Image (cartoon, rainbow, N blue to C red):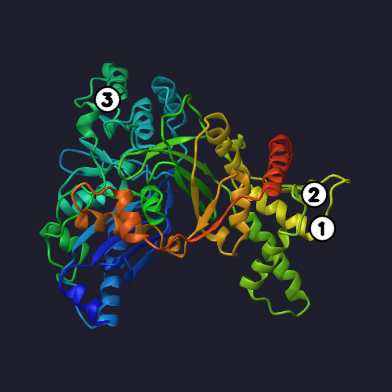
Amino acid sequence: MSSIKETIENGRAVLGLEFGSTRIKAVLVDETHTPIASGDHEWENRLENGIWTYSLDDIWNGLRDSYRKLAADVKEKYGIELKRIGAIGFSAMMHGYMAFDNEGKLLVPFRTWRNGITGQAAEALTELFQYNIPQRWSISHLYQAILNEEEHVKNVAFFTTLAGYIHWQLTGQKVLGVGDASGMFPIDPKTKDYDADMVEKFDTLIADKGFPWKLRDILPKALTAGENAGTLTEEGARLLDESGILSAGVPVCPPEGDAGTGMAATNSVKKRTGNVSAGTSVFAMIVLEHELKKVYPEIDLVTTPDGSLVGMVHANNCTSDLNAWVGLFREFAESFGIDVDMNKLFGTLYNKALEGDADCGGLLSYGYLSGENITGVEEGRPLFVRSPKSSFNLSNFMRAHLFTALGALKVGMDILLKEEKVEIDEILGHGGLFKTKGVGQGILAAAINTPVSVMETAGEGGPWGMALLASYMLNKKEGETLADYLADKVFAGNKGSKMDPNPKDVEGFEVFARRYVKGIAIEKAALENLV
């Protein structure tokens, strides 16, 4: 306790703060990268005039509240005021569109990553660049606004992400971590900067519009992990801490996206490594050794915080329908007057899946509560189906729902692993699917035929990952890479629990995957016929 108190008083503690889709969280860490205080604020996006958005008041009230609670946590635990901080880093949901004029005024309400309103632009840019440009990317939003002939576009002096906006307001610097920047516009992994050829193609594409800006003029400067991205100004300190206690002048690292902080928090920034986050949705981030040979709409190309190319497979659906079935079993048990412990229920049902047939006995399900781009399904229709010859029992039923939670992810991962021959040494799994020891972990290993590790620290999440990036900037030695810093200073001795793929399960998942892909026609028929 006295050691932590001294660390805080001497200004050596480091702060990471992340804006998630439903929660803003601040985490303070000590010199061993251990969380020592935290504060959070719940918030929710809203649909206004057909746009998913958060207001500027939402953003600043949430930031101040999470910091206020962090400072209160420090006061309660250690009996001291939080006056000095060694370094700070800000992170947020990637992508989206925040556009400002010359006076720093927001021109249109913040358009978040969740908006699916840029299909025309995304398709045109993907064709122009021969590079997958998803709808949620910032450049898709800008070009769609141009196609829509929106009045504000001629007045754009700067556009950025949510993390870039926060950082700019607190430091005066219009910069962005390269990982977050890679969700605005494609990055050239050789230069670790925006792809020059694509920038030129975009400027040529819109030349006839006569805008007073070129693309590079209005993009934030891309910085790699470890670079100094400015300091907390006096004005910024008051924006963050209304009490006036926090001192200005704190070094601030490049702001990052939630994908980058997830990579840092799971020690997955080195080539041939990756992580899979599995909860309501599921996504895999694989650090690539080389660029892909083709353009795949199923694969987003982004970068690590230090600029290495990453292949991302993102599926909208994972555990929601699975959780709904577990809820049904709880309701069944409670009907008999049984008081159900949910952790025990999940553990029992998940472990039951290990007793099932390798291929789930011919059963098939789709947990599509929403549409799934990877498989071309526009809307969700959760579905369970079997033939008279299927082996219908509880173990196969649970196994099928666990397999299908990773079904769309496997379709995308098969492109990387089988078509592009991407080599992966190890994957780290984190999220709700992996809470029951050995079950989700083993099923993921079978799905991608790759060893999967789970570490307890992975549960610390994005704000902790942001604090690690800030700590790296503050404490790195000359020539020390981010991968080395994480491996040697943060995760040394914490290898986690590793599971190799079981050959029988790998074979079973391949059989299930063929059934899953062929059965998409059933899912689409349900969409047409079930309102």
Helix, strand or loop at mark 3: helix
Residue 461 at what x, y percent from top left?
A: 41, 60
Residue 404 at what x, y percent from top left?
A: 66, 48
Residue 174 at what x, y percent from top left?
A: 19, 43
Q: Is residue 437 above or below residue 107?
A: below
Distance of label 1 from label 3 (alpha carbons): 57 Å
Q: Which mark is residue 196?
A: 3
Label 2 or label 3, whichever comes before in sequence order: 3
Q: Mark 1 — residue? A: 393
Q: Is residue 411 left or right of residue 423?
A: right
Quarter of the rendering occupied by the C terminus: top right
Evaluate if marks 2 and 1 touch, with contact meaning CB atoms under 8 Å apart: yes
Quarter of the rendering occupied by the N terminus: bottom left
Residue drawn at x 61%, y 47% as measured from the top left:
406
Q: Nearer the viewer, mark 2 or mark 3?
A: 2
Label 2 or label 1, whichever comes before in sequence order: 2
* Amino acid residing under circle 3: Ala
Determine crowd level at label 3: few under 14, some 14-19, many 20+ residues with C-alpha closer than 10 A: some
Helix, strand or loop at mark 2: helix
Q: Is residue 397 above or below residue 66?
A: above
Q: Is residue 476 left or right of residue 408?
A: left
Label 1 or label 3, whichever comes before in sequence order: 3
Q: Is residue 390 left or right of residue 53?
A: right
Q: Mark 2 — residue? A: 361
* Amino acid residing under circle 1: Asn
Distance of label 2 from label 1 (alpha carbons): 9 Å
Residue placed most toward the observer, 70 or 46: 70
Q: Is residue 335 above or below residue 323?
A: below
Residue placed most toward the observer, 121 or 20: 20
Asked if one can make out residue 371 in the rendered structure from this viewpoint, the answer is no
